Image: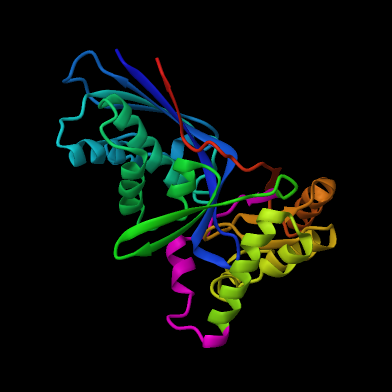
Amino acid sequence: MPTVSVQVPATTSNIGSGFDCIGAAFTLYNQFTYQVAADSDSPLTIAVTGIEAPRVKTDDSNLAYQSFLRLYQHIGQTPPAVKMAIALGVPLSRGLGSSATAIVGGLVGANVLAGSPLSQAEIMELAITIEGHPDNVVPALLGGCRLAAVDHQQWAICDIPWHTEVVPIVAIPDFEVSTAEARRVLPSQYSRADAIFNVSHLGLLIRGLETGQGDWLRVAMDDRIHQPYRQSLIQGYEAVRSAALTAGAYGLVISGAGPTLLTLAHPTQAAAVEAAMTQAWTEQGVTVEVKALELNRQGAIVAEG
């Protein structure tokens, strides 16, 4: 029976001043495998492996399976009975786009099994519709760092060059922050000064990522739209931020809605920043995993068997 595996990278969104419009894919992955069942009446089976496997739904409410069904609904075909296997490498509910991996993994897997009726751009549009915003699903599908803008319900997606000497380092704590709560603490209106601040810093962020200019990145990662309001939801935020900057990081931002914290650093400072963030959060009584990653430039990768 046909089998399709889809490897989808973790993502970060916002990167400080790029709130709800910038996302980047990193070298951390979930894998989704779909095997068409010999008997069309076979019940759905979903096997999940990985440290957080017990938390993943294994019935037809599973997000990857719901996305799989959504593609078949979109193209007007009856979906086949499948056996699914999910290998987890992206922490759940930590601000690293785990839900985006499920959406992209489901859509891409279904599209291949259906004979690839949809283009990558059409899959992207469907993924954005399911997720509700583009900043995680777009880089999860396409890879790289991406800026998304909408005009008359049409998305314009821009690739942002990422210099090889800009190292992303993620610090993943053992607690969660509710996305709903992270949205609730944001104000409904902002001042003109705050809007200008973020627009200018977003422009500088894009140039800093492209050139690797540390002096620009140190300024560019500041933000007035979401981080000042969300940092109180993250235990130890100030201590970790101070430690990272002292160790040589260009800046520290909340990855997505958190609680994962993201720093950018020069390769020569990466090890020191990793150690400093680990120590700072450990001293706060928080168990944390800190990883220096790379930008994933391929996005979702398909293997057929």
Figure check: 205 above or below 94: below
Horizontal and vertical percent position of residue 21: 48, 62
Between 112 and 200, the one nearer to me in the picture? 200
Q: How many numbered tags mark residues here? A: 0
Q: Quadrant of the N terminus?
A: top left
Q: Quadrant of the C terminus?
A: top left
Does residue 107 appear left or right of residue 41 in this picture?
A: right
Horizontal and vertical percent position of residue 179: 46, 61
Figure check: 172 above or below 40: below
Q: Residue at x 45, y 69 (%)?
A: 183
Q: Which residues are magenta?
A: 168-193
Regarding residue 299, the answer to whether it shows in the image is yes
- Is residue 128 one of those drawn in magenta? no
- Is residue 175 one of those drawn in magenta? yes
Regarding residue 228, the answer to whether it shows in the image is no
Q: Residue at x 58, y 38 (%)?
A: 28
The coloring applied to the image is: rainbow
Rendering quarter of residue 260: bottom right
Horizontal and vertical percent position of residue 27: 60, 38
Does residue 114 appear left or right of residue 160 in this picture?
A: left
Horizontal and vertical percent position of residue 128: 35, 52
Q: Residue at x 31, y 44 (%)?
A: 122
Figure check: 106 above or below 272: above
Q: Residue at x 58, y 74 (%)?
A: 198
Between 303 and 30, the one nearer to me in the picture? 303
